[in-house]
Image (cartoon, rainbow, N blue to C red):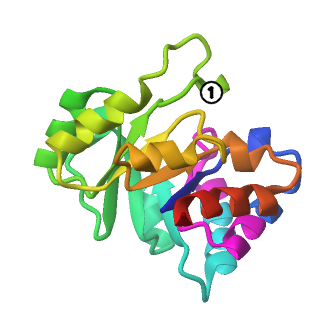
Amino acid sequence: MLYLITNRKISNKDYLDVIRDSVMVGVDVIILREKDLNDKELLNIALSIKEIIKDTDTKLIINGNIEVAKKVSAEGIHLTYKDFVKKKTNYNGLVGVSVHKVEESIMACEKEADYLLASHIYETNCKKGLKPKGLSFLKEIKNKVNIPVIGLGGISHLNAKEVIDAGADGIAVMSYIMSSDDPYNATLKLKEQLIK
């Protein structure tokens, strides 16, 4: 499984073209994560993405905004661990949770999250100065939970396979595709690593 987390601020090309290219190659899930947008702006982008993924197997998950997710009938929502445990999540679809500790993973699983986004595995500019958790973090989570675990953070075509070999059910990337000059081939390179 290949997840693309959006970030229009780091895109070198037209934002929707980047998403379109990744969908053409077969990205499995798009997590729409544009936290600075208001509901109306986010809704407009979500509707555009729904149009792009129409007649494909790509799923749309909305980060943090249940109302927009409901309006576009997104396949799921994605929440921070804090929001997931704090709020009653009433969504008829997938509910994913970001985790940064093994204990959070166990708790999220007990509270019936559908999947976990475990980060950050490798060094990444998105988390400058923060020590990566490494593959052992993934392995430990996989030993404790029975739901899909997606590795995130500093993943490229050079290390994607070792993340899968460590037990991850998939990988998630942001900058590797979003800031690529050739998002089509960037996605293709990642997909190739997941197939082998």
Q: Residue furthest top?
A: 129
Residue at 61%, 65% (x, y): give it.
46
* Rendered position, 73 above or below 149: below
Q: Position of residue 185 (x, y in %)?
A: 80, 60
Q: Secondary structure at mark 1?
A: helix
Is 51 above or below relative to 62? below
Residue linked to disc 1: 126
- Name the residue at 42% across, 71% down: 75
Whether the magenta-drawn stretch holds residue 38 is answered as yes
The furthest residue to the front = 196
Q: Is residue 73 left or right of residue 113?
A: right
* Image point (62%, 26%), residue name: 124
Residue 88 on the magenta segment:
no
Q: Where is residue 17 shown, x and y percent of the image? A: 82, 64
Coordinates of residue 166 in the picture (x, y in percent): 38, 43
Can you say which quadrant of the picture contains the C terminus? bottom right
Q: Position of residue 162 (x, y in %)?
A: 49, 43
Report the magenta residues as a range: 20-42
Nearest the eye: 85 or 22: 22
Q: Is residue 102 visible?
A: yes
Q: Amino acid at mark 1?
A: Cys
Q: Nearer the viewer, residue 137 or 179?
A: 137
Q: Can you tell which quarter of the image residue 35 is in?
A: top right
